[in-house]
């Protein structure tokens, strides 16, 4: 009841909701509960499915005859590979937003800032407040760096899969686009919830739309990843310069700062 109500509300306000598949739902639920992976559904299984679709040209199901059941056909394998990639990329885009950006990049900046403030206020007699740097501080930063590195490897794998998909379908996409966009491109026969065979028709414009949608998803992922790398790089630079400066504090424009005064310690 709740799902139907939300679906109708989105349609009223002109925002068609995204209908997630089972694998997408499991990946998003694992992200919300704090899990990194849920078996092979996170990365390896979708990557293998995409590889098989491209290698064996596995398109949509078709009903060859009224009496026969659905059979796999080669038509529409480009659209299907793009759809499978979107099922893989969208949950990973959420991981980049919530884990790499909010949990790692911003958290590391705040943690290092609080660490610097705490060490500056520790002992006024010590000329180098970071002289007594605890092992816990180093371990905390190293653990965040390790988690960020693993997430960075996953982003690289998703982008590598996109390059493979893009290289396989690019020629067909632009060949189809140069002709009439409303002409049928592929048919997808499937059984609905009542077991009745239904047919979905994809046009050449649909193929182009899925192609550019995959590129936009990867573009967002690249932008957010570069932003996270810049934030973490700045946090590590701030940490290193705070170790170097005599007062234990540093700013980009002012350089080394004197915590007890207002003049920078150049």
Image: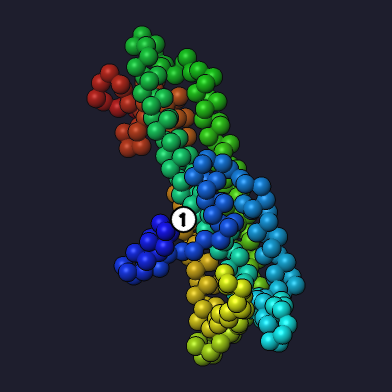
Residue designated by label 1: 223
**Spot occupied by residue 156 in the image (x, y as percentages of width and height):** 60, 53
Residue 264 picture quarter: top left
Mark 1 element type: helix
Q: Name the residue rendered at 75%, 72% in the picture.
A: 56
Which corner quadrant holds the C terminus? top left
Which corner quadrant holds the N terminus? bottom left
**Spot occupied by residue 148 in the image (x, y as percentages of width and height):** 55, 41
Asked if 60 appears above or below 217 in the picture, the reply is below
**Spot occupied by residue 40 in the image (x, y as percentages of width and height):** 67, 51
Is 242 left or right of 12, judged from the image as shown? right
Q: Name the residue rendered at 46%, 64% in the picture.
A: 18
Asked if 64 appears above or below 237 in the picture, the reply is below
How many numbered marks, from 0 up?
1
Residue 172 picture quarter: bottom right
Q: How crowded is mark 1: few (under 14 residues within 10 Å), some or many (20 or more)?
A: few
Q: Name the residue rendered at 31%, 22% in the picture.
A: 258
- Whether residue 64 is visible: no
Name the one closer to the observer, 84 or 6.
Answer: 6
Q: Which residue lies furthest to the left in this view?
A: 262
Q: Residue furthest front?
A: 194
- Whether residue 9 is visible: yes
Q: Which residue lies furthest to the top in this view?
A: 125
Q: Name the residue rendered at 46%, 52% in the picture.
A: 224
Q: Which residue lies furthest to the right in this view?
A: 56
Image coloring type: rainbow
Residue 245 picture quarter: top left
Is 119 left or right of 44, judged from the image as shown? left
Name the one closer to the observer, 61 or 35.
Answer: 61
**Spot occupied by residue 189 in the image (x, y as percentages of width and height):** 62, 79
């Amino acid at each position: 009841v709740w799902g139907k109500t939300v679906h109708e509300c989105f349609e009223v306000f002109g925002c068609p909701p995204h209908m997630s598949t089972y694998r997408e739902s499991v990946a998003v639920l694992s992200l919300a509960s704090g899990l990194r992976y849920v078996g092979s559904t996170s990365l390896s299984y979708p990557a293998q499915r995409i590889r098989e679709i491209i290698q064996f040209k596995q398109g949509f199901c078709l009903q060859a005859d009224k009496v026969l059941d659905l059979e796999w056909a080669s038509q529409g394998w480009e659209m299907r590979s793009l759809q499978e990639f979107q099922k893989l990329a969208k949950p990973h885009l959420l991981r980049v937003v919530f884990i790499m950006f909010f949990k790692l990049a911003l958290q590391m900046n705040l943690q290092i800032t609080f660490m610097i403030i705490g060490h500056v206020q520790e002992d006024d007699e010590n000329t180098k407040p970071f002289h007594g740097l605890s092992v816990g501080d180093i371990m905390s930063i190293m653990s965040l760096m390790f988690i960020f590195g693993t997430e960075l490897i996953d982003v690289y794998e998703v982008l590598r899969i996109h390059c493979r998909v893009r290289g396989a379908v690019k020629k067909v996409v632009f060949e189809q686009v140069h002709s009439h966009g409303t002409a049928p491109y592929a048919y997808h026969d499937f059984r609905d919830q009542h077991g009745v065979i239904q047919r979905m028709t994809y046009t050449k414009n649909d193929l182009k739309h899925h192609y550019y949608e995959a590129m936009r998803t990867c573009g967002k992922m690249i932008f957010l990843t570069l932003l996270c790398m810049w934030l973490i790089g700045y946090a590590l630079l701030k940490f290193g310069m705070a170790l170097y400066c005599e007062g234990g504090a540093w700013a980009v424009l002012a350089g080394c700062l004197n915590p007890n005064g207002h003049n920078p310690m150049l």
